[in-house]
Image (cartoon, rainbow, N blue to C red):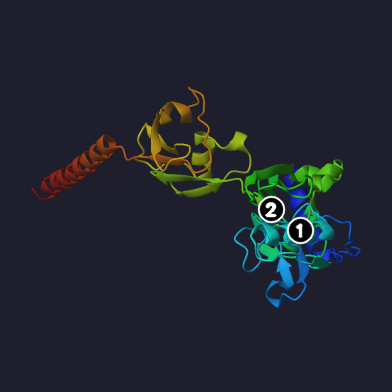
Amino acid sequence: MRRFGLFLFLQVAALCAQVPAEQTASPLPTDKIRSYDLVTISVLEQPLLTGPVRVDTQGMIRLPMLAHKIQAAGLTVVELGNAIAEELKTEEILVDPYVTVTGLDRRLSAPITVLGAVRTPVEFQVPGTITLLEAILRAGGIAPEAGTEILVTRAQPKNSGNTAPDAAGDNETHPALVQRVRIKSLLDGMDPGANLILVGGEEVRVPDTGKFFVFGNVKMPGSQQIQDPADSTVFRAIAYCQGLAPNASSRAYIFRREAGTSARNEIPIDLKNIMARKVPDVPLTANDILYIPDNIKRRDTLAVLKTVGGLALVLASALIYVGIYH
C-alpha cells in the first residue's frame, strides 16, 4: 500500500508539476571549462584554426592540422588559449601564434538520458543543471514495475575540472561512476542528498523489479512480476497460476541463468512436499523459469482407468440388455 502511494505521488507530480527552466548566470572568464561546453577559438591570421569548438565527452578538443587533441576540461578560457598556442608551437605549425578563447557557452548541457521503468523514456538537454527528481518527471514519472532504486551513471574524464591536465594531454577516462539512489529517499525528501544534481552526460536508469516465468502443468502459465522478493516463491507462484493441472508431476525444475553467461542451471525441487508444506518453500529470482512437467505415469494410469471404465460400462449395459430381453 505504501509502495502504491509512492507511485501515485510521482504520477500526480508528473502531471501537475511544472519543471521551471533552469536559470543560470553566464559563465565567467574564471570558470573552468567542462565537457560539452562550446568555446570560440581565434588564432590570429589563421581562419582554418578559428571558430567554435565543442568539448567532447573526455574533456578534449581537436583542431585542424593538429595531430593531438588538447585537454580543455579543467582549464579557464585563458589557460586553454595558452595550451593551444603551446601545442601549435610544439607541432611546428606556427612559430609565435596569438590565440584567444572566448564565448564559453553552456546554454545546452550534454544529453541526459532517462530510461528503464519510467512512463516515457526520454533524452534531453538543459541549460545549466537539473535535479534528479526533475529528470524523472520529464520522463513522466516512475512506472509501477519499478524496483526500489535509481541508478545514475556519470562518465569520468581524467580531467573533469578538478585537476590540472598532465603534460601529455592524455584523454584516458576512468571507469564510469554509478550512484544508487533509493526511490523512497528521493520522494520523501528526508535525505536531500538523494536529489542529485545532474550537469549533463548522465544516464538515469530505473531498473524494474524483474520477472520470472511459470510453464508446464499449471492452470494459467505465464510471467509474474516480482513486487516483493519475499513473496516470490514456488508455492506462491503456483497459487498465482491458479494451481496445478491434474497431471502435474511431483517434481519440478527451476532453470536459473548463471551470472555473466547465457547458460542456465537446472535445479530440481520437491514440488509435492512444497505444496503440502512439508519442506521449506523455494525462492524465485528474476528471469527464473519454473517448469512443472507432465506426470506421464499418472496420465497413462488415468487413460487406462478411463478405458477400463468405458469397458465396464459397456459390459454392464450388455448384461442389463441380456437380462431384460432374454
Q: Mark 2 points at which residue?
A: 204
Quarter of the image with the N terminus in it: top right
Which residue is at the far left? 326
Which residue is at the far top? 278
Given residues 49 and 119, the one toward you in this image is: 49
Given residues 224 and 133, the one toward you in this image is: 133
Query: Based on the displayed image, in which of its 4 quarters is residue 112 positioned?
Result: bottom right
Q: Where is residue 48 in the image (x, y as percent from the top left)?
A: 68, 75
For image coordinates 57% across by 46% down, the residue present is 210
Q: Is residue 140 above or below residue 184?
A: below
Is 36 placed left or right of 105 in the picture? left
Q: Name the residue under label 1.
A: 135
Helix, strand or loop status at disc 1: helix
Q: In this view, does 284 lie above or below 65?
A: above
Query: Based on the displayed image, in which of its 4 quarters is residue 13 positioned?
Result: bottom right
Q: How many labels does the image show?
A: 2
Query: Looking at numbered disc 2 in the image, what kind of residue is underneath it?
Result: Val
- The answer to the question of whether label 2 and label 1 lie on touching residues, with beta carbons closer than 8 A, is yes
Q: Position of residue 86 (x, y in %)?
A: 73, 57
Q: Can residue 112 be seen in this view?
A: no
Q: Where is residue 230 in the image (x, y as percent from the top left)?
A: 61, 34
Query: Looking at numbered disc 1 in the image, what kind of residue is underneath it?
Result: Ala
Given residues 23 and 158, the one toward you in this image is: 158
